[in-house]
Every structure is written in C-alpha cells, then in structure tokens.
Amino acid sequence: MPEFPCPESKKQRASATIFWFVSEARLAKRYFVSGMVQGVGFRFFTQHSAERLGVRGFVRNLWDGRVEVFAMGTPQQHKELQKLLERGPFGSEVTEVREEPAAIESQYDGGFVISPSA
C-alpha cells in the first residue's frame, strides 16, 4: 500500500488509508451494444480495449444481434470503455450503448474473456 505524507496522528493516517480504498473502488456494469456489431470483430476489439484499460469481465454475442459486455473497473475505466464501445472497431456501426448497474462477480477477477454466445 502506498505511503501518504500525514502527521503522526493515527486518526489522520486512517483517513488517508480509507481515501486510498475509496478512490480505487471498483464497480460492475453491463453494456448492451446495438447496431452492426456482430461479424465485424467487435468482441475482439472489446477484449483488447478492456485488457488495455485493466477492466475485468466478458463480452459475448446475443441471439438478437446485440453484444453484451460485463465489465468491472473504476469509474474512470468505465468512462473510457464506454467511449470505445460507442465508437466500435472499423466496419461496425454502433447505434446504441445501453448501460445497467451489475453486481461484482469474482470469477472474472483474472481478466477479460470472450464468452460463448447467448
């Protein structure tokens, strides 16, 4: 854990430690991406983008033509990922990115994967 320059008071040192954990808080979201997003490399683009950002989770095609993204990361990581999802890879045409809150799922702590279609 990083050291924070604080006076020797235990109360102040505890406050700095709490701030560290709050500033690095992770949250989970599901994104549903609509448009021409299947058959254009969207899942590979999403996996590469998420790994580069340090986001954990999965991406998969849905039966209705959308792509589902489950992502766990900091608010800043989610902001960056959403921008990339809205743009998509070359050849895709994103018409909508819908976001929903989700619960943290520990089985995805190891990285970001492409899951089988649903």
Image (spheres, rainbow, N blue to C red):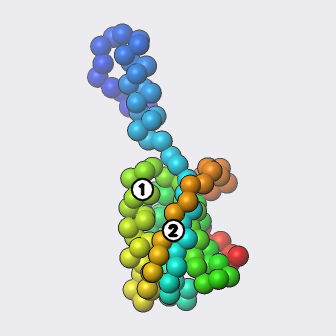
Vertical order, 20 against 102 (above or below): above
Quadrant where the N terminus is found in the figure: top left
Q: Residues within 10 Å of mark 2 (few under 14, many from 20)?
A: few
Q: Position of residue 33 (x, y in %)?
A: 52, 75
Q: Position of residue 72 (x, y in %)?
A: 54, 54
Tag 1: residue type? Gln
Please state which of the two labelled residues, at mark 1 or mark 2, is closer to the viewer: 2
Q: Position of residue 44 (x, y in %)?
A: 51, 77
Tag 2: residue type? Arg
Q: Nearer the viewer, residue 97 or 45?
A: 97
Q: Residues within 10 Å of mark 1 (few under 14, many from 20)?
A: some
Vertical order, 18 against 108 (above or below): above
The secondary structure type at the circle numbered 1 is: helix
Q: Residue at image x 43%, y 85%? A: 93
**Residue annotated with mark 2:** 98
Q: Nearer the viewer, residue 111 or 23?
A: 23
Residue 86 can be seen, yes or no: yes
Vertical order, 37 against 70 (above or below): below
Distance from the alpha carbon under mark 1 to that under mark 2: 17 Å
**Residue annotated with mark 1:** 77
